[in-house]
Image (cartoon, coloured by chain):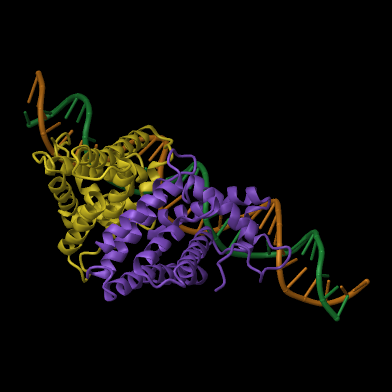
Chain colours: A purple, B yellow, C orange, D green
Amino acid sequence: MARARIVDPEEGPRSKRAAILVAAVERFGEDGYESTKWSEVADRVGIGQTALYHYFESKAHCLLTIMRLELQRSHDQFVEATRDLTEPVGEVRVAVRAAFAVSEQEIRQMRILQANMSLLANPRKSKREETERVAARQLVQMVERDWTNLLMRGMSKGAFPLRDAHTLGLSVLGMIVSVWRWYRPTGAIPLAEISEMIEGCVVRMVAE
Amino acid sequence: MARARIVDPEEGPRSKRAAILVAAVERFGEDGYESTKWSEVADRVGIGQTALYHYFESKAHCLLTIMRLELQRSHDQFVEATRDLTEPVGEVRVAVRAAFAVSEQEIRQMRILQANMSLLANPRKSKREETERVAARQLVQMVERDWTNLLMRGMSKGAFPLRDAHTLGLSVLGMIVSVWRWYRPTGAIPLAEISEMIEGCVVRMVAE
DNA sequence: AAGCAACCTGAGTTCAGTTCAGTTTGACTG
DNA sequence: CAGTCAAACTGAACTGAACTCAGGTTGCTT
């Protein structure tokens, strides 16, 4: 399973696509998508504004790409973490831990993803944007299914009480990702502590 | 405790402020803030675009007002629901139920609030916008404190195991509000069922 | 060295949001 | 019931950030 990467090996050696994505993640993640000027990203990379359009059809296309890459990464990380396990409670624990085992760049990407999730609801006018949007939506559903399936397996094995796995899965996922709305690496509580607390909450939610 | 209302009794009889807020909630809630043209709201109300500026300094000012009103309502509803109770588990149950006892208009307002929460992070340039933003931020903290205090009371009474009440409160709140990201009244699952499921989850999370 | 595709640019366009410079409306006063 | 005044409104013009266009430059390939 190819881990989603900012650096695409298909790119030419002169390409600034990766640099643009990194700069955009930095700016969108710190100041927010709307309050970041597209030209600021160009300045950060050291190119003219119009050069951005060589790599992305629009500012929104860049944002959607960032979101899609992050969703792909989240899904891959879930799959990788839960690959070899068979004991439901252990699987849940490891999945929560995987969700919080992220770099600072990935934290920004999660924040961007959460803050702009509603962008995925409405169709886009341009083709390439719409392609990214649809891909991102499918990945959202895939991540939701990752959790739903995990819970259903646990229920059918008798490890978890029977409940609506879909609603429960969305609730678990909602709680996990809500952290990215307020967590800052500079904050008082270390991420490991949050992860541990959420892990316990999820286990009690689904297994009791 | 004055319940936050769209209709402000301070308004003159000819005022269209309430109509604008209702139309904006409708449009922002269905299509999203960014993809709604400010002039569409004017059309919906039946006035010229420039007339909007008689009531709101900007499109963002209107959005911030909607968010502030909804936060005020959420806080008031929490306080009202938990007023007379003293038994922690019962208080938690009633608080969750109150969070989901909302009209269709209020669902849209919650959706708008969740989708645009990140707008509250950065300062605004204009005075009136900044006033609304700061008020909204304080209300967010108030709602967070509502939950945190509820949990702390339960812990000190020995009804809940001792945990970091702040992080736990944010997690509970995050799970509850995450519903507004995906719930639609037309969906397969009725809100009452979701409310019940979340209520159980929250109780297991905090009381076990 | 020619060819050519990737990469880049300055000047100009677009469009939603906003400002401006007034005009209309209707409740209230004398 | 005429005059007044603030609230409510308007069409035309402005602004700024996203985007388009018509080319120009770079450096790898043969």
Determine whether, in the image, residue B8 is placed left or right of residue A130: left
Q: In this orientation, which residue lies closer to the viewer: A171 or C15?
A: A171
Residue drawn at the location 19% of the way across and 54% of the way down: B105
Residue drawn at the location 16% of the way across and 34% of the way down: B10
* Vertical placement of residue C3 versus A24, above or below: below
Asked whether residue A36 is in view, the answer is yes
* Vertical placement of residue B165 versus B103, above or below: above
Determine whether, in the image, residue C20 is placed left or right of residue B157: right
* Vertical placement of residue A28 versus B65, above or below: below
Question: At which x and y percent is residue B42?
Answer: 29, 51
Q: Quadrant of residue B51?
A: top left
The mark total stands at 0
Q: In this orientation, which residue lies closer to the viewer: C17 or B203?
A: B203
Question: At which x and y percent is residue A156?
Answer: 27, 76
Residue drawn at the location 29% of the way across and 39% of the way down: B54
Determine whether, in the image, residue A75 is placed left or right of residue B71: right
Question: At which x and y percent is residue B106?
Answer: 20, 52
Which quadrant of the rendered structure holds the N terminus of chain B?
top left
Asked whether residue B181 is in view, the answer is no
Question: At which x and y percent is residue A187?
Answer: 45, 39
